[in-house]
Image (tube, rainbow, N blue to C red):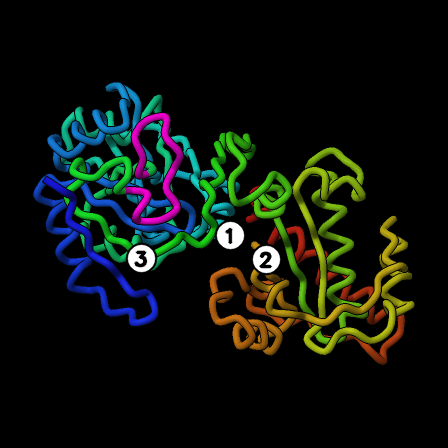
Amino acid sequence: MSTEVATIDRERGEFDELIGRAAEIMLQGGIVGFPTETVYGIGACVTSSVAVSRLRVMKQRPSGKAFTVHLGSREAVAALVPGRSALADRLIRKALPGPVTLILDVNEPSAAPAAEGLDSFALEAMFHDRTVGLRFPDDNIACSLFRAVGSPVLAASANAAGAKPPREGKDVLKGLDGQIDLLLDAGPSKYAKSSTIVRVRHNDYELVREGVYDARTIQRLATLRILFVCTGNTCRSPMAEGLAKNVLAERLGCEMAVLPERRVVVSSVGTAGGFGGVSEHAVAVMKKRGIDISAHGSTPITPDLIRQADHIFAMTHSHADAIRAMVPGAEERTVLLVANESVLDPIGGGEKDYEVCAKMIERGVRARLEEVDV
């Protein structure tokens, strides 16, 4: 019997009924082919031993070797990996949804919320050697399907073992017609290239396979970025930047200039920045601490800098409000540098005023960086 094909027009966007039908097929033990931004995939619901067995035969994957778990939301990660490293969380936030497969450690797979009620056969298909592979595609059709299924979806590329992963629905049928129950055909994939696979171990990672993203892109995504924000970016936030670099360099046992090589980038911007250099008084009070910020130039805040930052520390409530207004999704990562207090602008004052400000900033920097896992 030939595979049923459901053609989806992405531009029309009306595919709820087809997604519901595909999800029902999977929940009843069927296998469905679906599009992603990389290549087409085939998936089975983890609760169906029949479907998982069919998937193993189709992909010639022996028992004991797990499949990648495909997710429809970032929140679904917690049910599979309850405890994660800072690096894992960073990559989850920055790289997902997207063309990346993350392999994460799971201390006790059977204790993960997603494992509740599953037998050993299902657990073996999800977890391998206390790890799980996660894929959260940047494709609304695929993610709608995974959410509709409700249980973890195990998936692989939609080709027979050893064949080239398909970029279009018609290519899926060339190799698997009659072997899968339904194909959601949404035309050519966006990238026509496999996902990048990254193995995360604690706070380090290994690039297992380059795909859509190359090594340089993964390095950028894995880098911890700390951003300090004031108004003009000529005194308060540059002082905070210098102090933070000093603290982090001490913690990591390296020179401040080497921090980027250790995947740590600290910077500062201003909500009205972009004009002039750093204040001479700010330079003077930092020099007393052995920190040179004299080369700093005022930089304006941008949505991209906000999105890239893992931690954003604002000097006042008005700065925090400006950040949230510019990028609404930044709320979780934006806090006042000094809890419940504003660091007021010393502009117009003398060096003593800058010293008072610097001491307050230093107190805030040290306290906040205690909360940051490098």
Q: Position of residue 136 (x, y in %)?
A: 37, 48
Left or right, 283 with respect to 173, comes to right
Residue bearing mark 2 = 308
Disc 2 from disc 1: Cα separation:
8 Å
Left or right, 288 with respect to 345, comes to right
Tag 3 secondary structure: loop
Residue bearing mark 3 = 186
Above or below — where is 282 with respect to 243? below
First in residue order: circle 2 vs circle 1: 1
Identified by mark 3, the residue type is: Ala
Identified by mark 2, the residue type is: Gln
Tag 2 near tag 1, CB within 8 Å:
yes
Measuring 24% from the left and 19% from the top, which residue is drawn there?
63
Residue bearing mark 1 = 94
Tag 1 secondary structure: helix
- Magenta range is 158-172
Left or right, 153 with respect to 343, comes to left
Q: Which mark is residue 185?
A: none
Magenta stretch containing residue 168, yes or no?
Answer: yes
Q: Position of residue 33 (x, y in %)?
A: 25, 45
Above or below — where is 41 with respect to 356? above
Left or right, 225 with respect to 120, comes to right
